[in-house]
Image (spheres, rainbow, N blue to C red):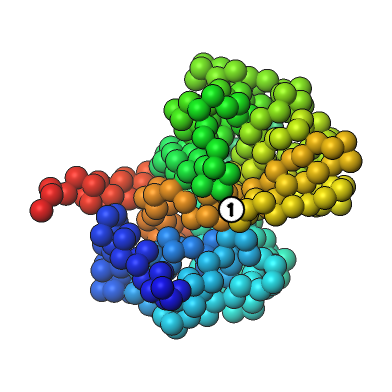
Amino acid sequence: MSEHARVSAELARIDAFFPILQGLGTRWAASRPFEGLTVGVHLHLTTITLALVRELVLGGGRWVVSAANPATTDHGVVEYMRTLGLDVHTGRGSRDGVEATVAEEPMLFADVGFALGSALLDEGQRPRGGVEITASGVTRLRERLPLPFPVLNINDGRLKPAIESRRGVGEGLWPAFTTLTGQHLSGRMVLVVGYGPVGAGVAAFARAAGATVEVAENDPVRRLIAHYDGLATTDAVPALKRGRIVVTATGRRHTLGAAELASLPEGSIVLSAGHGGDEIDVAWLRNHATTVDQIGPRVVRYTLPSGRRVTVLADGHPLNIVTNSGSPEPVLLHFLLLGLGLEHIARTDLPPGEVCLPVGLEEEAARMALGVIERPAG
Ligand SMILES: NC(=O)c1ccc[n+]([C@@H]2O[C@H](COP(=O)([O-])OP(=O)(O)OC[C@H]3O[C@@H](n4cnc5c(N)ncnc54)[C@H](O)[C@@H]3O)[C@@H](O)[C@H]2O)c1
């Protein structure tokens, strides 16, 4: 199957089973909310993002797309977007793509990890506004306050944490884990580091699959919530020594740094459900390993001087995104919010700074999704 045919087939599957974005495309084709605007999109370039972008462009405007992470970039999607006439930048690193998008001086933007927003600030640009969809991005944008333009925070609304972060990641991560390793979760020990919405979902789906789950969380409130969710709570370092499957869901650089990685016992498997590629210090493993074996696609085993072996999945990048695994529904749902958010900024004069998602926007997104979900069969 050609790449174009594979990507088309995936779009057709989305259209057949969860066509929640088409309503927006139809509306935008008539109302053209983005006419006259350059819009920068900095996202993971997967087929689900393509399903969004395909509808967005119907609303007019000029669209410039950059890849958020080379490890999550589907090159079939990049080519498909180019056939739609889009300007797509993959770059060798994520920064190269961002720079190309910044050079187009977008007036609106959609961002993951506040990479594009930060670059626009660095260049002194004053877009009309943007939307940020991730927890990591919201943390970064708060580090840059006060902002001279509005950024709509999609992450901390009601829908995104409950559905995409909590259910989407947990549901997608574990099938990918089993495909890559061949391991079943039943009876295994899983340590989840970070108990935000993502970690909570990863833990819940692991437990449902029969694993024994422990949670390491720095925030005492979330740690207590994990306890009342029925999970054993612990500090990361002693728990790491017991060895297991370890998942990071923190958005924080080097959550598994040199000390944590060195304390892992023989046979541990580590993976990320968070953001970017640096929650696990894979470079440290690479530099300290006596041997590095690629034992399967996206599965690398490092043997340390102590003789202990540590296996890393997807080079420490978010496994569910790299493998595009799980149902596309949760991501499509928060992309619905992203689209409505961009339309809102195009139409409304918002104050500069972090802007909370209007309640009405989330209700509209929920109603649109329910319209598809509850549609009578036949
Ligand atoms: N893989 C995906 O598809 C996907 C989807 C949504 C979000 N994300 C990303 O996943 C990450 C987590 O998202 P979230 O919404 O749960 O974020 P969050 O910020 O709400 O939760 C992260 C938690 O990790 C804890 N933490 C940080 N460092 C820690 C450490 N060293 N040890 C123990 N706990 C630690 C924090 O206290 C916090 O409670 C973010 O980076 C987000 O951008 C990934």
Q: Is residue 102 visible?
A: no
Closest to the observer: 287 or 357?
287
Q: Nearer the viewer, residue 38 or 193?
A: 193
Name the residue rendered at 63%, 29% in the picture. Answer: 191
Report the front residue among 118 and 227: 227
Q: What amino acid is found at the position of numbered circle 1 in the picture?
A: Gly
Query: Residue 14 placed where, x, y %?
Result: 32, 59
Left or right of 44? Residue 290 is right
Relative vertical location of residue 36 with respect to residue 7 in this rendering, above or below: below
Q: Which residue does the numbered mark 1 point to in the structure image?
A: 353
The residue sitting at 41% across, 69% down in the picture is 7
Q: Quadrant of residue 20?
A: bottom left
Q: Is residue 339 visible?
A: yes
How would you rate the neighbour count of disc 1 (Cα within 10 Å): few for under 14, some for 14-19, many for 20 or more?
Answer: some
Q: Where in the figure is residue 86, as x and y percent of width and height?
A: 48, 79
Say above or below: 195 vs 253: above
Ligand 1 location (quadrant): top right
In the image, residue 211 lies at what x, y percent?
A: 53, 26
Element type where label 1 sits in the image: strand
Q: Is residue 93 above or below residue 304?
A: below
Q: Residue at x 70, y 54 (%)?
A: 294
Identify which residue, 351 or 38, lies in the foreground.
38
